[in-house]
Amino acid sequence: MSRMKPTERREQILAAAITIATRDGFNALTRDGVAEQAKVATGMVNHVFSTMGKLRKAVMKAAVCREIKSIIATGLAEGSIEAHEAPEWLKRDALDTLMKK
């Protein structure tokens, strides 16, 4: 079995984190949970993202790019710079989605 390229490994872990944030909420992200979802060791999550802050920032940036409104709404509520940099229409839609729950 060949080793995964660093960019592929990063995407694997990021995808796992996005799955958790979408399913359980952005605040449910933990190293252990992301590692379990990605099927990697916790140390690999640390190696790729170094801090939970960097992982959370990457998840929020990806949520904006992929228009994942539930994650963006949480980011807006928590003052995430990445969420606040989303287009105005996306921020409105994200908050509307949150208010309809």
Image: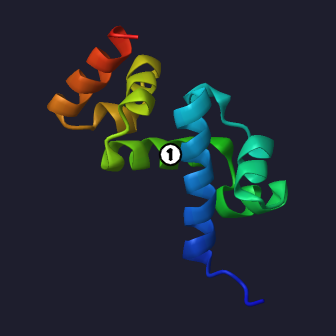
Q: How far across and how far down the image is residue 8, in percent?
A: 57, 73
Q: Amino acid at mark 1?
A: Val
- The residue labelled by disc 1 is 59
Task: Judge whether 51 appears above or below 48 on screen.
Answer: above
Q: What residue do we see at 55% from left, 64% from top?
A: 11
Q: Is 69 displayed left or right of 35 in the figure?
A: left
Q: Is 13 displayed left or right of 88 in the figure?
A: right
Q: What residue do we see at 67% from left, 80% from top?
A: 4
Residue lying at the far left in this picture: please name it.
89
Q: What residue do we see at 33% from left, 10% from top?
A: 100
- Quadrant where the N terminus lies? bottom right
The quadrant in which residue 98 appears is: top left
Q: How far across and how far down the image is residue 39, in percent?
A: 77, 59
Q: How far across and how far down the image is residue 79, in percent?
A: 42, 23
Within-10-Å neighbours for mark 1: few <14, some 14–19, many 20+: many
The quadrant in which residue 76 appears is: top left
